[in-house]
Amino acid sequence: MAKKIEWESVFEKALQRSEKEGKPVLLDFFNPG
Amino acid sequence: MDAVTYPKDAVVEFVSENLIPLRVQFNEEPLASQFRVKWTPTLVVLDEKGEEHHRTVGFFEPNQFIPSQMLGIAKVAFDGDEFKTALEYLERLLKEYPESNSAPEAIYLRGVSLYKSTKDPKPLKAVYEKLADAYPGSEWTNRAYPYSLL
C-alpha cells in the first residue's frame, strides 16, 4: 500500500500535536474542486 | 498538489517526519478569515500557538515544495530565537536543494542566524558576497547589499 500524508482536519488537534511533538504545523487551504 | 506533489515518497516522508500536516477547505470558517485566504493552494507554516511564520500561494513541484517547507520550519525556529534549529534546516536546504527557489532566502537567513547567534558580523558580509556571486538577480541579493558595507 502506497504511503500518503496523514492530514489532520481539526486546527486545535494539530496545535496540540505540534506542542507535544515539537514540530510546526503545515496548514494547507485547498479547493476540493 | 494532490496529483503531483503530495503523492511523492520524498514529500510524504519529509512532511511526516518534520511537520504536523493539517488540511482544511479554503472556505472553512473561522480559519479562512483568520488567515485571509483568497486563493488556493495557500500553504502556511505555524508554530504550536498557531502563529504564522511562512506562507506560499500556488503550486509547488516536489523539488520546490520540500525546500520551501524547510525554509518555513527554519523561520519558525528563527522567530523563536532557536538559531541552532534554524541553521540545521537552512544548511540542509542548501545542501540538498541548492538550485531551489528557496535557496537565496535560505542563504540570507543563514547569515542572519549566524550573526544573531554569535554577534560576529562576518557572516552578514559573507551573505552578500555569496548571493551576489550565485544569485545576482535575486531580491535577496538586493536586501543583503547593506551588509557589503560592513
Image (cartoon, coloured by chain):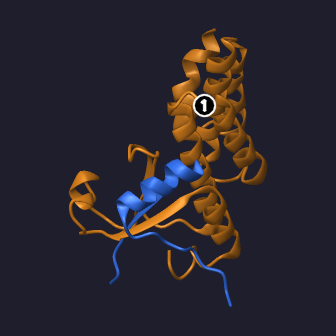
Chain colours: A blue, B orange
Residue B37 horizontal side relative to residue B71, left or right? left
Q: Is residue B119 above or below residue B21?
A: above
Identify the amino acid type marked 1: Glu
Q: Is residue B18 above or below residue B26?
A: above
Chain letter of the residue carrying label 1: B
Quadrant of the drawing holding the C terminus of chain B: top right
- Which residue in the protein does label 1 denote? B82
Residue at 44% across / 65% down in the picture?
B22
Q: Position of residue B69 (x, y in %)?
A: 57, 54
B106 or B52: nearer the eye?
B52
Residue at 72% across / 30% down in the picture?
B130
Circle 1: is it few (<14), some (14-19), or many (20+) Cα within 10 Å?
A: some
Q: Is residue B62 above or below residue B125?
A: below
Residue B57 horizontal side relative to residue B10, left or right? left
Residue B20 horizontal side relative to residue B92, left or right? left
Q: Position of residue B60 (x, y in %)?
A: 53, 65
Q: Quadrant of residue B117?
A: top right
Q: Residue furthest bottom?
A: A1
Q: Is residue A4 visible?
A: yes
Residue at 64% across / 37% down in the picture?
B86
Q: Position of residue B118 (x, y in %)?
A: 69, 15
Q: Residue furthest top?
A: B150
